[in-house]
Image (tube, grey):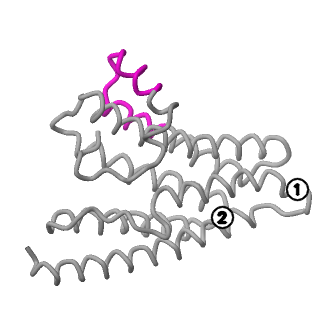
Amino acid sequence: MVPPDSRRPLASRDTSWARWLTARLARTAITPNQISMAGIGFAALAGGALWAAGSAGGSARAALLLLAAAGCQLRLVCNLMDGLLAIEAGRRSPDGAFWNEAPDRLSDMLILVGLGLGLGQPALGWAAASMAILTAYLRELGRASGQPADFSGPMAKPQRMALVTAASLASVAEPLWGGQGGLLLAALWLVVLGAGLTALRRSWRLIHGLNATGGA
């Protein structure tokens, strides 16, 4: 569940398909926290597929890459739906703050470390996961310090997942030019560097905000 004061600004909340799906979910007994848990499952699916794709070839590799892309996007759908069901459908729970953050951090690790393992670059995968978690930590540190939640990029969660999704889909065509893994490796490096830049930017904005408000 997403607390109302920490919602990421998303245009997809106002789409007809999101409103339709929220209405359908509201007629079931499914809770926002259960949707958050499902997001972990889709992230594990994506991470596992990326890992397995590293040692697969031909149509099996293509299928795994498509599965990874789908898992990344379904993880984001879960991230959207848990908040919509919690806020718009009035199903908030006292432990919602935990389910808003903890599953996302685990999902980041599952996908990015899985990608690193599939590429034979586990250290790079852990570096990407660490940078991703650091960006979220700085956002929550800002909120705990009385500042607005900072969702700035250039490599926040939506951008990370879009990049991994796009690289997975594009990598399906790599056999056409005799490549295997180059696009995914470039994407993982971009996540590391982009998330690191995001952490620096959020740090600067947080320090500036604290100084402007006297730390209140």
Residue 88 falls in image quadrant? top left
Where residue 195 appears, as percent x and y from the top left, is: 47, 71
Q: Which residue is mark 2?
A: 120
Q: Is residue 24 magenta?
A: yes
Where residue 20 appears, as percent x and y from the top left, is: 47, 25
At horizontal 46% and vertical 26% (from top left) the residue drawn is: 21
Callout 2 crowding tier (Cα within 10 Å): few <14, some 14–19, many ≥20: some
Q: Are marks 2 and 1 in contact (CB under 8 Å)?
A: no
Residue 60 falls in image quadrant? top right
Secondary structure at numbered mark 1: helix
Q: Quadrant of the N terminus?
A: top left
Q: Residue 97 vs residue 50: left or right?
A: left
Q: Earlier in the sequence, mark 2 or mark 1?
A: 2
In the displayed structure, 27 sits above or below 89; it is: above
Secondary structure at numbered mark 2: loop
Q: Which residue is mark 1?
A: 175
Q: How many marks?
A: 2
Q: Is residue 83 magenta?
A: no
In the displayed structure, 28 sits above or below 121; it is: above
Which segment is the magenta one? 20-41
In the displayed structure, 194 sits above or below 107; it is: below
> Residue type at mark 2?
Gly
The secondary structure making up most of the magenta span is helix
Please tell me which residue lies in front, 92 or 122: 92
| Cα distance in 3D space between marks 2 and 1 | 19 Å
Please tell me which residue lies in front, 78 or 117: 78
In the displayed structure, 44 sits above or below 6; it is: above
